[in-house]
Image (cartoon, rainbow, N blue to C red):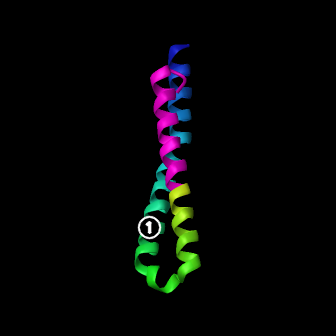
Amino acid sequence: MFQVDNKKKLGLRIAWIVPQVFLSLLDTAFLIFLVLEWENLGPTRDFFYGLLWLLLTAVIIYGFIKIGSWIKEGKM
C-alpha cells in the first residue's frame, strides 16, 4: 500500500513540475524576445509586453512556491 501512495505522489509531482518547467522556458524565451525587439515594439506595446512578462513571471514563481509547500506538507 505504501508503494502505491508513493507512486501516486511521484506521478502527481511530475504532473505539476513538468508544466512549470515548460512555463519557465517560455518565460525565458519571452524575455529574450523582449530584449531583442524592445526598440521595435513602440511606446505602448513595450509597456504591455513588459507587464505581461512580469505577470507570467509572478505566476511561475507562485507555482513553484506552491509546489514546494505541497511537498513539505506531504501532499505531493
State the residue position of label 1.
31
Quarter of the image containing the N terminus?
top right
Identify the residue at horizontal 51%, vertical 39% (top origin). 14
Residue 28 at what x, y percent from top left?
43, 62
Name the amino acid, label 1: Leu
The residue lying at 54 percent from left, 71 percent from top is: 47
Q: Secondary structure at mark 1?
A: helix
Q: Quadrant of residue 45?
A: bottom right
Q: Main secondary structure of the magenta part?
A: helix
Query: Residue 15 placed where, x, y %?
Result: 56, 41
In the image, 6 versus 65, the foreground residue is 65
Looking at the rendering, which quadrant does residue 4 occupy?
top right
Q: What residue span does the magenta drawing correspond to?
A: 56-76
Instruction: Residue lying at the far top in this picture: please name it.
Output: 1
Furthest residue toward front: 43
- Using the image, determine if residue 52 lies above or below residue 11: below
Question: In percent of the image, x 57 and y 63: which residue is there?
Answer: 52
Residue 22 shown in magenta? no
Label 1 crowd (10 A; few <14 / some 14-19 / many >=20): some
Q: Is residue 39 above or below residue 3?
A: below
Q: Where residue 56 sits in the image (x, y, percent)?
A: 54, 56
Q: Does 66 appear in magenta?
A: yes
